[in-house]
Amino acid sequence: MGVITTFLLVVVVLPLAALLWESKKSGVHGFWQIVSSPEAVAALELTFGAAFTVALINAVLGTITAWVLVRDDFRGKALVNAVIDLPFALPTIVAGLTLLALYGPRSPLGAHVAYTRGAIVLALCFVTLPFVVRTVQPVLLELDEEMEEAARSLGAGRLAVFRRIVLPNLLPGILSGVVLALARALGEIGSIVVISGNVPYHTEVASVFIFTQIQNGYPDYAAAVAVILLAAAFVLLLAIGALRFFATRHERA
Amino acid sequence: MPRRLGLRAVALGYLVVILLAPLAMVFYRTFENGLHPVWQTLSDPDTLHAFEVTLIATGIAVPLNAVFGVLCGLAIVRRRFPGKGLLNAFIDLPLAVSPVVIGLCLYLLYAPRTGWFGSWLLGHGIQILFALPAIVLATIFVSVPFVAREVIPTLRELGNEQEQAAATLGANRWQRFWRITLPSIRWAVIYGVVLTTARCLGEYGAVAVVSGRIVGKTETATTLVEDLTLNFNTAGAYAVSLVLATIAVLVLVAMTVIRPREGAA
């Protein structure tokens, strides 16, 4: 027990305490002043906006991908299934460079979206791809197709079956995937930094803002925005815990 | 069935646009001008040093996190202690919080003069920030939860009947751990180690803040990719990326091979 506690204290808790201490130094007023400065507001708005957009894209396309991987059958499915995890294995900076190669200034498709907000969404879609797929897939595998057949034999249309039977069963899985993707998207830097251009007020996300402030010698500015990201991470972790609690309610009863 | 084909097209099309086409493009761009520029970058002493720094940090972080992950998993599943719920909920924090925030935390602790331990370290001539120790600390922090997260569900399913049986037959704690528990969770541990390794090798955000990125000294493989890109050495950046991507593909193969076994174990 002592080993775990000491390890966590030194490696995780102490650094976090230093962050909270630094932001406490500037006081509530100072904290508010930094966080409400135009550049910080722009960065935070962009970050949360892009993260929610990407979470939504993942909710739809991730669910469809999981569905295709479980219910559909085609040649090379095993390979596709393995490739889904690639964004977890690939260093994020390589992910960014990869996207720059195809969607950057030298794009062979003429699809030059680099240094725009669209590029940020693209990068975030890349790194968050596996989350919803991997949380929905096991639920879908367990889901009894007989339920759907019963509904269909009782006259339910495809849409009704999906809305009334499939979706309610998948929802906890989709939501936990979305929350994980959201957490990841809020804090992402590696894949964004090479493709977004990092223009303040326009394509500068919160994590890049923090990075720049540290480099320029304003750790108090960095700390204030970092506290917001940290708070968001805490809230999302609590949400995941609550979802897990809800999803296992029948097992516990 | 057209509906099925439609969904398949959407899913596969998305994967191609977001994942496969860009990767193919990197391969093409890397070898566009032949093997020479690739070799030139990869045999450069600064490149080799960057990989060395990355490997050292990974080599320290992975074993530490593996031991911690197993101990932490055992504590969460098998024991009752105050703060257990809290530990279980927040063990994932390093995955949920931005790596830059983690880097900033370490910066605030160890920055010379201004950091909590800054003046003490300075007085004793110990450098942590902008040196290897900070890179190692950042790498450990970002990859803390992986092994624990894999081990916890496996331990839950395992139960402790076998261990109790061993205990009644006179096995002590060490024997029970080495002969019963560890062999039962070995695939989960290996899977966690694979994920940890991938994360350590690829860490960018936290390391970029604390390493100082001194070429030939504290540059890591990932920060080198960014510097090469910024210096318009695109071929070099792609070459280093390709090495990292190859490692990622190997990791992927390992994951694909291990996962079914983990389910079976």
Image (cartoon, coloured by chain):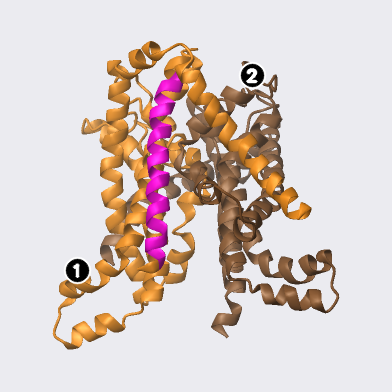
Task: Give the residue drawn at x 20%, y 75%.
Answer: B176
Q: Which chain is orange?
A: B
- Residue B178: mark: 1
Residue B121 falls inside the magenta stretch: no
Colour chain A is painted in:
brown
State left or right for residue A8 relative to residue A232: left
Task: Give the residue drawn at x 30%, y 55%.
Answer: B66
Between residues A81 and B77, which one lies in front from this camera angle?
A: A81
User: Is disc 1 surrounded by few (<14), some (14 to 19) or many (20+) residues within 10 Å?
Assistant: few
Distance from disc 1 to disc 2, alpha carbons, whole Å, reads 56 Å
| Disc number lying in front (1 or 2) | 2
Name the amino acid type tagged 1. Trp
Residue B169 in which image quadrant: bottom left
Where residue A5 appears, as percent x and y from the top left, is: 32, 61
Where residue B117 appears, as percent x and y from the top left, is: 32, 40
Between residues B32 and B48, which one lies in front from this camera angle?
A: B32
Q: Is residue B223 visible?
A: no
Q: Pointer 2 indicates a residue of which chain?
A: A
Task: Give the residue drawn at x 27%, y 17%.
Answer: B45
Where residue B127 appears, as percent x and y from the top left, is: 27, 31
Task: Give the residue drawn at x 60%, y 72%.
Answer: A247
Name the amino acid type tagged 2. Pro
State left or right for residue B177 relative to residue B50: left
Does residue A8 sit above or below B246 in this rendering?
Answer: below
Q: Pointer 1 indicates a residue of which chain?
A: B
| Quarter of the picture holding the C terminus of chain A | bottom right
Residue bearing mark 2: A108
Where residue B243 appears, as percent x and y from the top left, is: 38, 29
**What is the chief secondary structure element of the magenta stretch?**
helix
